[in-house]
Image: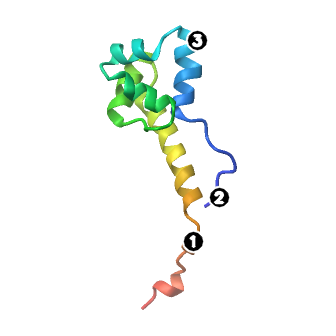
């Protein structure tokens, strides 16, 4: 598995720079519209929380995207951090070692 070389764009950065700002929406307006506390949106934007499947569905409906768009962005970020955290990677298993 090849390690990512740069940190992926966070879902919060996409939400803020590609949706909220161009649409002239505040975090509070979006939160109220999709029925979540403003803290949920603020934490996603500030990378203190990830996008959950439920929030992904709500964002998808409100912003005319798919839930997968948000979950893929979150998963990519999560994998980046997991790979960065893993210092001792397991070696691939060979068929010879599996034969008993």
Judge by depth and name the residue closer to the eye, 64 or 37: 37
Q: Residue at x 35, y 36 (%)?
A: 53
Q: Secondary structure at mark 3?
A: helix
| Marks 3 and 1, the one that precedes in the sequence | 3
Does residue 42 sit above or below 50 in this rendering?
above
Mark-to-mark CA distance, 1 and 2: 14 Å
Does residue 34 sit above or below 1 in this rendering?
above
Mark-to-mark CA distance, 2 and 3: 35 Å
Mark seen at residue 22? 3
Colour option used: rainbow
Give the label, 1 or 2, closer to the camera. Answer: 1
Residue contact at pointers 3 and 1, CB within 8 angstroms: no
Q: Position of residue 63 (x, y in %)?
A: 45, 17
Q: Position of residue 82 (x, y in %)?
A: 52, 56
Is disc 2 surrounded by few (<14), some (14 to 19) or many (20+) residues within 10 Å?
few
Q: Secondary structure at mark 2?
A: loop
Mark-to-mark CA distance, 3 and 1: 43 Å
Relative horizontal placement of residue 44, taking residue 16 as reference (left or right): left
Extreme-right residue of the structure: 5
Q: Which residue is mark 1?
A: 88
The image quadrant of residue 52 is top left
Relative horizontal placement of residue 22, taking residue 62 as reference (left or right): right
């Amino acid at each position: 598995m090849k390690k990512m070389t740069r940190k992926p764009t966070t879902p919060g950065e996409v939400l803020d720079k590609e949706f909220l700002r161009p649409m002239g929406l505040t975090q509070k307006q979006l939160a109220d519209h999709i029925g979540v506390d403003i803290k949920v949106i603020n934490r996603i934007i500030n990378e203190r929380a990830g996008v959950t499947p439920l929030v992904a569905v709500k964002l998808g409906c409100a912003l005319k995207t798919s839930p997968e768009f948000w979950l893929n962005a979150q998963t990519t970020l999560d994998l980046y951090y997991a790979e960065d955290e893993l210092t001792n990677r397991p070696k691939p298993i060979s068929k010879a070692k599996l034969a008993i």
